[in-house]
Image: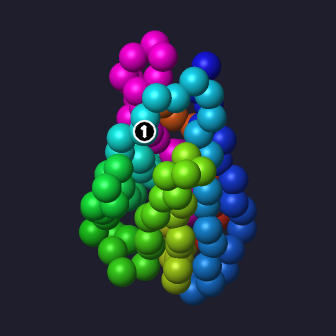
Amino acid sequence: QVQLVESGGGLVQAGGSLRLSCAVSGSILSINAMGWYRQAPGKQRELVAVITSVGSTNYADSVKGRFTISRANAKNTVYLQMNSPKPEDTAVYYCNAHIIATMGLRDYWGQGTQVTVSS
């Protein structure tokens, strides 16, 4: 069974910094792209950032220049460094990974971690 466990969420002041982590565990053969999504109250879930297995990245326009996604392949972990967060970044942040496991290839999601940015 594959699990994604997020950590690092919480309350942060606007202009501060916060780092989210997501560790993948279980019967994994390989991990392709990994990413972070977020969902604010009353809004649809949206892509924040994604990173491929070779380190190529893509960001939502709203976070470019402020957030940085990275991964540690040896640890099966993806990170999201949030610098200069704004109140509008407040949301539940979800980790996502395209994983080839013993049961085949599919998307997996974490349980979500709340990030609240105070003004």
Residue 34 placed where, x, y %? 41, 47
Q: Is residue 93 magenta?
A: yes
- Residue 20 percent coordinates (x, y): 61, 61
Q: Quadrant of residue 13?
A: bottom right
| Pick the front one: 32 or 43 | 32
Three-letter residue code for mark 1? Ile
Asked if one can make out residue 2 in the rendered structure from this viewpoint, the answer is: yes
The residue that label 1 is drawn on is 31
Answer with left or right where residue 70 lies relative to residue 111.
left
The residue drawn where x is 57% and y is 24% is 27
Residue 49, percent from left and from top: 37, 58
Is residue 52 placed above or below 118 in the rendered structure? Answer: above
**Position of residue 71 measured from the top left corner of the image (x, y, whole percent):** 48, 58
Image quarter (top left, top right, bottom left or bottom right) of the C terminus: bottom right
Secondary structure beneath dot 1 equals strand
- Which residues fall within the magenta stretch? 90-107
Asked if the magenta segment contains residue 33, the reply would be no
